[in-house]
Image: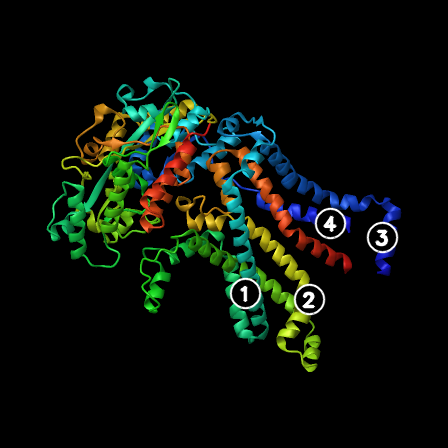
Amino acid sequence: MKRRSIVALCVTAVLAAAIAATTSGATQKATGNSITVWLQTDAQSGWPDVVAAANQKFQSDHPGWTANVQYQSWGDHLQKLDATLAAGGGNGPDVVEMGDTETTKYMAAGAFAPLTKSQFDNSATWLGSLAKSGTYSGKLYAVPYYAGSRVVTYRTDLFKKAGIKVPATLAQYQADAKKLLAKNNKKGFSPVYIAGTDWYVAMSFVFDYGGGIATRVSGQWKGLLASKNSIAGLTAYKNFFTAASRASKTTDETHPNPYDVYAQGQVASMLGPSWFSCCVGKKYTGSTAQFVMPGHVKGQAMPGFLGGSDLAVPVTSSNKALAADWIADFTSTSSERALQKKGNIPNATNLLGNTVNERAASRSWFVPTAKHWVDVENGNILRNMLAQILTGKLSIKQAAQSASDNIASVLNQP
Amino acid sequence: METSRRRRRAWGRAGRGSVPYLLIAPVVAVIAVILGYPLYYLVRISLQQYGLFELIQHKGIAIGLRNYHSVLHDQVFWHTLVRTVVFTAANVSLTMVIGMLLALLLTVVSAPVRVLLSSGLVLVWSMPVVVAVQVWYWMTNYENGVLNYVLTKLGIGDYSQHDWYGTPFSQLSMVTLLIVWGALPFVVITLYAGLAQVPGDLLEAAAVDGAAPWRAFRDITVPLLKPILLILTSLSIIWDFGVFTQPYLLIGQSKITSGNYLMSIYLFEEGYFKTDYGRGAAISLLMLVIVAVLSVVYVRRMVRIGVSE
């Protein structure tokens, strides 16, 4: 009897062990002399020609070498990077694109190789927040790649049909949404398409009303979402969403991509990165334009999230010098000019122009610069709060209070 | 019986009992390499502080049982455990009941229908999980899913732009549907094979003696199928308790919160997303113990059946 139990336990343990086994995706290393570059899919859909030009330059400077660009998605690229860091042995990527909110944790852990600032074009005039996100203890670990602000991409023909012009205030935009809706009664049509849990948009409302996410008070992080101003911003967001967007209240801004819904003719305007204009569909390319999202105070733009990307060389790379050369090619003045033409903000102040995107960057906000901020993003604390608010599962105050406490506890982790 | 005993004696004389060990050695070696070592490593990491910094250095810091302590004092862990147990129970019972009904159906339908039904099942089986998730995701899509379209057209109600992933309950219900759908082929085909082994004359005799079909099913079919039922149930428990791909992909990363965690997702979020591999290892070992406890009863009975035969 006893032995049988032991046998049973052993069998169970072996079977159960199978569930504990996890797999990790390994990167595909091209054979021959090549470096591996991980870029986000934004480059794949938005500016593949700029990538190709950099590769060409790299190959002509280094005969016999090629750059093997592999596209990653924001959702899981960090897990993939972790797996290659764990494996070591030079099989991982030689260059990785990092969001500027993600770099701190990795630089602190020694994941990137130091770089020489003078090797890169315009390094003296790099955009402040981007340069900061690539520097740790005075050393450069990541090169600014590009920044992007968020603007409104809209259908000029539909605005004309509804008899409206570019709105000057948030209230006017909300009233315009009703006019647009009256002229387009197709089911599921959104005057302003916003994905319910698009926290980049929602936090813009919060910052517009003078609120914030979290602040550091004598060494401790304190949540700000439940403050009076933040609540006012969240309330404005809920009202605006209810009036203007027929998108799912619980889904993020990539399922589906707003521009895909736009290309189907179901959207009069949408809020998002300025490169959204890339993919509005052939039918609407001629009737698409952009404007700066108005704030609730007349004459003031709504602060937009100033996101950006950096390029870094993982310590596990076996071709660090070549990797740095590729980064220099990809962030050269001509390359940055090309990125600017696609609707991005170039990485240096001396290259800045006067496009709608660059004007929108005049009022901007950024996430708390904390080591654990990336855990707040990955934990979907803000998205969950927005879903609760929009579906009415919790009151704005309750949802904001619980998210605020949650964020503070994550950021205050050792 | 007699011949096998004689053969065993012959082996014993020749190899002095070492042959069985030699025969089993390759299997033991393979298990030791692919399961034993990772398991040992898992235990070691679970006793260490092992984050991103340690990952790059390839060296953890020993901290004793602190990871276990922090997991067991985490409210989220206990909520997740209860949710996962309920989720598993729902999945396994739905799979077994519907599987049994379909297997019984297979025994009574005409040959062409049987071929149609079983090829449908095999098609489900042959579909890769990730593809299946994508198909389900599209069918239940908020913007233009076919499910909402059909429900609206049938006049059941206005389901245009109905959000099937609005609450944790409905999210997990969609996952349950997908999992049960995917698990049915294996269960149905195995049970159908088992039903073919139930002697027809026994059922006939029962019918002659006036036993109702339900009575015959309960007292003849089920006892004869018991070994198969036990194996299927315990395997289903193990699979469903640790299921990851379906919930993670169908619900989607951006909707995963501590309010809809299942055990494997909790493990993934804590271990990988927060790059705290020590804590992740502790969670996975706790999961292993829980699954062992959950299925030990079944496995014990299985072993007992094997011995008594």
Could you say whether the residue bearing mark 2 is in a helix, strand or loop? helix
Tag on residue B8? 3
User: CB of mark 3 within 8 Å of CB of mark 4?
Assistant: no
> Which residue carries the number 4 mark?
A5
Could you say whether the residue bearing mark 4 is in a helix, strand or loop? helix
User: CB of mark 3 within 8 Å of CB of mark 2?
Assistant: no
Q: Is residue B222 above or below residue A131?
A: below
> Which residue carries the number 2 mark?
B223
Q: Are marks 3 and 2 on the same chain?
A: yes
Could you say whether the residue bearing mark 3 is in a helix, strand or loop? helix
Q: Amino acid at mark 4?
A: Ser
| Residue sitting at x 85%, y 54% | B7
**How far is disc 3 from disc 4 in space, using C-alphas?**
26 Å
Q: Give the image quarter of residue B44.
A: top right
Q: Are marks 1 and 2 on the same chain?
A: yes
| Residue sitting at x 65%, y 59% | B230
Callout in the foreground (4, 1): 4
> Tag 1 or tag 3, which sits nearer the N-term?
3
